[in-house]
Image (cartoon, grey):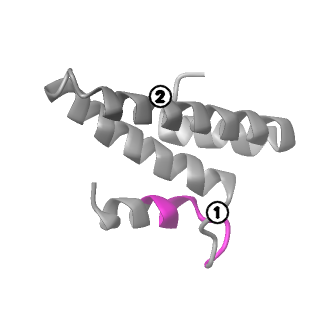
């Protein structure tokens, strides 16, 4: 996974120019990392350390999405739609 992928996700979901830590940005970056790690695990089925990291990332994303849903539901719905997440 390259820095270019992460920066493109940040730019797409930023709320303002210097935003790097809002829920939207964090969820977008985690989604990119999850997709990359999922592809890795398809080829390396026995890589248990990466599998554990994937599970932690999914749980972190889930927590961030739950928080966003509580605080700002329209923004949550838009983010889930743009990232094509199952919800």
Q: Is residue 47 above or below residue 16?
A: above
**What residue is at 63 percent from the left and 52 percent from the top?**
24
Q: Residue at x 67, y 65 (%)?
A: 15
Q: Is the residue marked by circle 2 packed among few (<14), some (14-19), or many (20+) residues within 10 Å?
A: few
The numbered mark at residue 81 is none
**Residue 10 to residue 86: above or below:** below
Residue 6 belongs to magenta span: no
Quadrant of image for the N terminus: bottom left
- Please tell me how crowded label 1 is: few (under 14), some (14-19), or many (20+) other residues with Cα within 10 Å: few
Q: Nearer the viewer, residue 72 or 27?
A: 27
> Which image quadrant is residue 14 in?
bottom right
Give the residue displayed 30% in from the left and 42% down from the top.
36
Q: Quadrant of residue 59?
A: top right
Residue drawn 46% across and 42% down?
31
Q: Position of residue 29 (x, y in %)?
A: 48, 52
30 in relation to 25, above or below: above
Residue reaching furthest left? 43
Q: Is residue 47 left or right of residue 34?
A: left
Point out the residue furthest to the right here. Answer: 71
Quadrant including the C terminus: top right
18 displayed left or right of 34: right
Does residue 51 appear left or right of residue 11 in this picture?
left
Q: Which residue is mark 2?
A: 55
Q: Nearer the viewer, mark 2 or mark 1?
A: 2
Earlier-in-chain disc, 2 versus 1: 1
Give the residue pinned by disc 1. Answer: 21
Compared across the picture, whether 19 is left or right of 10 comes to right
Image x and y of residue 44, in percent: 17, 28
Q: Position of residue 25 (x, y in %)?
A: 58, 56
Tell me where the magenta segment starts and ends, as one range: 9-17
């Amino acid at each position: 996974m390259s820095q270019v992928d992460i920066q493109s996700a940040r730019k797409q979901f930023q709320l303002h120019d210097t935003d790097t830590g809002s829920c939207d940005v964090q969820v977008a970056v985690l989604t990119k990392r999850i997709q990359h790690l999922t592809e890795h695990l398809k080829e390396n089925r026995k890589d248990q350390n990466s599998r554990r990291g994937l599970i932690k990332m999914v749980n972190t994303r889930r927590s961030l999405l739950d928080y966003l849903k509580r605080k700002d539901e329209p923004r949550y719905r838009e983010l889930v739609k743009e990232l094509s997440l199952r919800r």
